[in-house]
Image (spheres, rainbow, N blue to C red):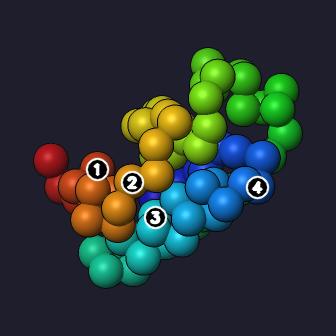
Amino acid sequence: MKIQILGTGCPNCSKLAENAEAAARELGIDYEIEKVTDLKEIMSFGVMVTPALVVEGEVKVTGKVLSSDDIKELLGPS
């Protein structure tokens, strides 16, 4: 599963990345985390507020730092 964190490297972006990694590990899923810091690339997702969480190319949340439990709900089976 590809998880992308969109943001410029601010503390909130780092915390979201940390929480996403913890969630994926706790779920035991095979994952790759990519931090996207290029503003043009961030905007190509239609994101104007960071941090943002993207899962498999789909923007899941913007402008929030979700807890690992909240992220597990997004990553887990629906």
Mark 1 or 3 closer to N-term? 3
Indicate which label's residue lies in the foreground, 2 or 1: 2
Residue at the image position 42 percent from the left and 76 percent from the top? 22
Measure the C-alpha gap from mark 2 to mark 1.
10 Å
Residue highlighted by disc 3: 20
Which residue is found at the position 70% from the left and 45% from the top? 7
Nearest to the observer: residue 64 or residue 61: 64
- The answer to whether residue 44 is visible is yes
In 3D space, how far apart are the residues under numbered discs 4 and 2 (Cα atoms)? 16 Å
Secondary structure under the numbered disc 2 in the rendered image: loop
Q: In this view, does 66 lie to the left or right of 27?
A: right
Q: Mark 4 points at which residue?
A: 9
Q: Earlier in the sequence, mark 3 or mark 4?
A: 4
Name the kind of residue labelled 1 in the image. Answer: Leu
User: What is the three-letter code of the residue carrying label 4?
Assistant: Gly
> Which residue is at the front of the view, 58 or 42?
42
Q: In percent of the image, x 67 and y 60: which residue is there? A: 11
Q: Which residue is labeled 1 in the image?
A: 74
Q: Which comes before the other along the chain, label 2 or label 1?
A: 2
- Marks 3 and 4: CB-CB under 8 Å? no
- Residue 70 percent coordinates (x, y): 27, 56
Type of amino acid under label 3: Ala
At a point 63% along the width and 54% down the height, the residue shown is 13
Q: Which residue is disc 2 drawn over?
A: 66
